[in-house]
Structure formats: C-alpha cells, structure tokens
C-alpha cells in the first residue's frame, strides 16, 4: 500500500446550488416516508407466506441488520454532508474504479423505487378500478401502465417545488403514512388469535432457518426497510447536518422497526383461524397456479391489510387502508424521485455522469436529474410488470449499495482520523466489518438468479459511465490499485452463490434452479462471512492514500475545482 502522508488539509466537500432548508423533522420524515411505503402493504403477507409465524423473527433480524448499516450511514453523512452521499463516499475512499460500481448501484436502487411504488398503487387501486390490474397474471393492464406513467410524471412535477415547500408536502404525507399503520395495529390487535402462529400443522417456522434467512430479501423485508439512507441523499439540503442527519437516520429506522414488527404480529393474529388452518397454515395463503382461488385468499393477495380488516368485520378500517394504499406508495415514490435526482447530481460531481446532471434551478433543484429519473424509470416498468417481481432485484441493488458504507467508514477512519466527525459509530473496528459481512449475507440470501442479473446490470453501468467519463476532459483518474479487491469480491460472491443453497427464484417459477447446492447449509454462510472479512481487510489495505483521498474531497469543495488527483 502506498505510504500515507499528511500534506493535504482536511476539508469538507461543498455542493453547488443546493439550499439547506430541511430541519430535523423534515430530514427524519424524508427517511421515514421512504421506509413506510408499499413494503408495509405487502411485506407482512409475503413474510407469512414464506416462513409462517416466524415472520416476526425475520422483521426483528432485519431491523437489527438495518440499524447497524444505518449507523455507518449516520457517521458518513454527518462527516461529509453532500447530496447523493451513497454514490460519493466510496469515490472519496477508494477512487473512481470502485466508486463507479457503488455509485451506479445507488442510482439503480433509487431510480427503480418509484416504478415499484406505482405498481403497488395500481394493485390496491384495482379494488375500485378492476380494469387497471390483472389479479391472475399479477400484472398491470395497458390502462394501468398508462396511469403509472402519469403518476410518475406527477412525482417529477411536485419535485420541481423549492425544497422548503416540498418538505411541507412530504411532512404532511408522512404524518398520515405513520398514523394509518399505527391505527391498523391498534385495531387489529384487538382480534387476537395467537394460534395462527402455528396453525395448519406447519409449526412456527416452516422451512426452518434456511427459509427464514431467505425470506429477508425474497419476501421484501429488507426492501421494506430501504430508505433510511435518504438523509444521505439529501444531506446537501439539511440544516445543521452534523446534528440533524445522524439523529434523523437513527430515529427513522427505530420508528420503522417498531411499526413493521407490530404490523406483522397484528396481521397474523387478526386473520380468521378457520381460514389459516383450512389452507395449511400461513404459508398456504396463496392462490394456486391453476384453477380457482378461494375468494378470501384472492382478496388477501390483492390487498393484505384491507382484506384482513374486512374478514375481521372492521370494514371502516379497510376503507382507510385502501385510501392509504394510494398515499403510502405515492409518498415513497415522491421522495425517491427526489433522491434519484440528488444521486445523479452526486455522480455528476464525481464526474461519472455528464455535467448537465449537476445543473440546478433557481429553487435549488437538480432539474435535469428529475427529468432523467422519469425517463429512465419508464424503462423499468417494461420488463418487470408487478411489485413482487421487482423486489428481489432492487433489494440486491440496495444491499450492494449499502455494502459501500461500512467499507467507507473503515477507510475514512484510517485515512482521515483527524477529520471532524459529529457522530462517531461506536466500536467501528467491529461494527464496520460486521456490517459488511451482513450486507454480503443479504446479497447471498437473495439467490444466484438475482446475483447474476445484478452482475449484468453492473457491467452495463461500467460501460455507460465509462463512455460518459471518456468524453469528460476533467474526469478523475482510474484508481485501479485501490479497487483490486472489487472484481474478486463480486465474482467470488457470484461463485459462492452459484454453488450455494439459494436460487433466488420464486416458488412458482417453472424453471429448474440455477444454483447447484453443492455447498451445504451453514457452511455456505460461514464461507460468505470469512470471504467478506478477507475482502474487507484487503480493501482497507488498498484504500487511497490520505493525500489522494483528500484531493478528491477538495476537488468537490465548491465552484473552484482543483486539478485532478494524481495517478498512483
């Protein structure tokens, strides 16, 4: 590793044209509205179908995992409060070669959430307008597709408002989004049927530990928690970010964890016992691939919580939930459209994207990024026509993005130990590598089907960004030496997944599994954990030297940019 020097002053990057107009509540609600989206509408059902009563354990495990990852993002965002942070921290720590990969996955994760939320909106709206969604194919219809495009256009239009006005709109929506799940929890918990946790003779955890871990990505649980990083994406617009940003991240995750765990319990105990027992337990709450579906089961799959309310004789709650089914996904789609434009702004500041993405309106809005978010989002509507089919891929992209945070925390601790850290993650020497291990396990549990598709997406990303950078005379140097671990990490995870236990295919997929299953259960996770620690330590050894890292930071210090950092 190159010797680290101290010849460059520690500075803080500064975003150009953005306005710091978000306070603590606005920042907290920016993350909370991302967390409480379509995930709460469907996650409880999919988790119960996957692992029965043990779904509550899945939400608890995921909550702990996400809190650890959130602490990494809290330190990074408070230390370097720049917009599109998840796309920029790895750039500072490891240079452009590694930064391109993490930055592109940040963009993919952000730009695809709005289409997912639109699909969830259409699925629930089909109760009132059946012609927009086909419950047999689980796809939106042509009419639904057109309405989805219109809804995404509305997201973009609202985002053109100044941040202080947008924040008021978002705060109002989020108060509603938090209040409705809490109301549902209170009402549904009064219909207590604890026997549902083990009904149907399947026991508390059908499928065992293997199914439990697989449910975290496959059932949309990790996807439901996605969004806590929204504060990092909007960090360039948060007032007093050293205080407000880490508080907002931690508060939003804790609120989300409590709500999701209680929602899962409420969903299970409020189901009619005869329905659960008569269909082989919670895992039997699915429609058969052929033949007629029980009307109650069909209604559960179309709108889980609204159907539970109707089955429990609380029709008035069902109407509120169906209204919220429009509000919750809309609020999340709205804020992710915001986040997408900030990520593309950050990628332009890294000089990965064309500089036009750094254009900011008089209201402080990266308007080119907003328009691009709409256009690119439309492409993700085409090959993935339902909520559930998008979740696995986006969860994988999210976790790959999240893996960049613990790596950046560890790198910065070594590169700039003297930098101002308004929030310091406790025992980072342990939690940072532990968070990286957990991120890799989540990627592994996503299954080989998801991982190889993500590999294709990543190759496309490197090609596109490579073209953009080739046309930029001020592009950063390609720091190959600081990213030698990256291809080994990605290919290694792919090989372990290919030989491991998780296919990533749904139970209804007619194709044979693409993984071999040669590595036994438990051994697979041990191998992933050891492999992850090796990669983490390798990355720490090859991170950018201090001077080169600080030159990249200084280069984003404001209007006047410094010459490119030297090659090493």
Image (cartoon, rainbow, N blue to C red):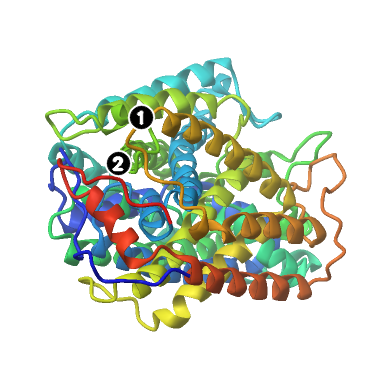
- Nearest the viewer among 528 and 221 is 528
Question: Can residue 48 be seen here?
Answer: no
Mark 1–mark 2 Cα distance, whole angstroms, equals 9 Å
Tag 1–tag 2 contact (CB < 8 Å): no
Question: In this image, 474 relative to 58: left or right?
Answer: left
- Determine which of the numbered discs, if any, sits on residue 349 in the image: 2
**In this rendering, is residue 20 above or below 262?**
above
- Answer with left or right where residue 209 lies relative to residue 25: right
Which label number is shown at residue 26? none
Q: Which residue is at 38% across, 26% downward?
A: 372
- Secondary structure under badge 1? loop
Residue under circle 1?
354
N-term-proximal mark, 1 vs 2: 2
Taking 451 as reference, is 353 left or right? left
Name the one closer to the observer, 332 or 7: 7
Q: Secondary structure at mark 2?
A: helix
* Residue 107 on image: x %, y %: 44, 41
Residue at (36, 71) in percent of width and height: 4
């Amino acid at each position: 590793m190159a010797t680290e020097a101290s010849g460059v002053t520690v500075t803080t990057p500064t975003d150009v044209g953005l306005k710091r107009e978000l306070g603590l509540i606005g920042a907290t609600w920016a993350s909370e509205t991302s967390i409480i989206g379509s995930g709460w509408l469907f996650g409880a059902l999919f988790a119960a179908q996957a692992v029965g009563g043990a779904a509550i354990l899945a939400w608890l495990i995921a909550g702990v995992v996400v809190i650890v990852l959130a602490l990494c993002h809290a330190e990074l965002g408070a230390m370097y409060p720049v917009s599109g942070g998840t796309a920029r921290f790895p750039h500072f720590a490891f240079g452009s070669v590694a930064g391109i990969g993490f930055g592109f996955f940040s963009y993919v994760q952000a730009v695809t959430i709005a289409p997912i939320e639109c699909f969830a909106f259409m699925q629930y709206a089909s109760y009132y307008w059946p012609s927009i969604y086909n419950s047999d194919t689980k796809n939106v219809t042509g009419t639904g597709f057109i309405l989805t495009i219109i809804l995404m256009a509305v997201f973009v239009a609202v985002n053109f408002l100044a941040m202080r006005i947008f924040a008021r709109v978002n705060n109002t929506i989020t108060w509603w989004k938090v209040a409705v799940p809490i109301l549902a929890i209170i009402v549904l918990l009064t219909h207590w049927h604890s026997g549902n946790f083990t009904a149907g003779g399947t026991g508390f955890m059908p499928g065992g530990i293997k199914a439990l871990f697989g449910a975290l990505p496959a059932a949309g649980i990790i996807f439901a928690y996605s969004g806590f990083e929204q504060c990092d994406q909007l960090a360039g617009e948060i007032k007093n970010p050293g205080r407000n940003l880490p508080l907002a991240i931690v508060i939003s995750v804790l609120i989300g964890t409590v709500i999701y765990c209680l929602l899962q319990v409420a969903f299970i105990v409020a189901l009619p016992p005869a329905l659960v027992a008569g269909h082989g337990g919670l895992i039997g709450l699915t429609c058969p691939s052929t033949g007629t579906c029980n009307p109650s089961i069909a209604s559960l799959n179309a709108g889980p919580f609204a159907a539970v309310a109707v089955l429990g004789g609380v029709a008035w709650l069902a109407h509120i939930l169906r209204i919220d089914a429009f509000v919750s996904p809309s609020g999340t789609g709205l804020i992710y459209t915001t986040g997408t434009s900030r990520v593309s702004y950050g990628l332009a500041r890294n000089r990965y994207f064309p500089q036009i993405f750094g254009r900011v309106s008089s209201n402080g809005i990266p308007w080119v990024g907003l328009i691009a978010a709409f256009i690119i989002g439309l492409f993700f509507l085409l090959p993935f026509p339902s909520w559930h089919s998008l979740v696995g891929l986006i969860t994988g992209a999210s976790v790959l993005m999240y893996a960049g945070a613990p790596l950046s925390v560890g790198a910065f601790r070594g590169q700039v130990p003297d930098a101002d850290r308004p929030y310091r993650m406790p025992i980072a020497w342990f939690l940072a590598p532990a968070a990286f291990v957990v991120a890799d396990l989540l990627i592994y549990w996503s299954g080989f089907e998801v991982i190889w598709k993500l590999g294709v997406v990543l190759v496309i990303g490197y090609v596109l960004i490579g073209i953009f950078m080739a046309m930029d005379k001020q592009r950063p140097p390609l720091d190959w030496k600081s990213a030698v671990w990256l291809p080994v990490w990605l290919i290694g995870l792919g090989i372990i997944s290919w030989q491991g236990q998780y296919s990533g295919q749904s139970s209804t997929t007619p194709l044979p599994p693409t993984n071999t299953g040669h590595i036994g259960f438990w051994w697979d996770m041990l191998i992933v954990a050891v492999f992850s620690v090796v990669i983490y330590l390798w990355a720490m050894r090859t991170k950018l030297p201090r001077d080169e890292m600080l030159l990249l930071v200084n280069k984003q210090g404001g209007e006047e940019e410094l010459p490119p950092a030297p090659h090493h």
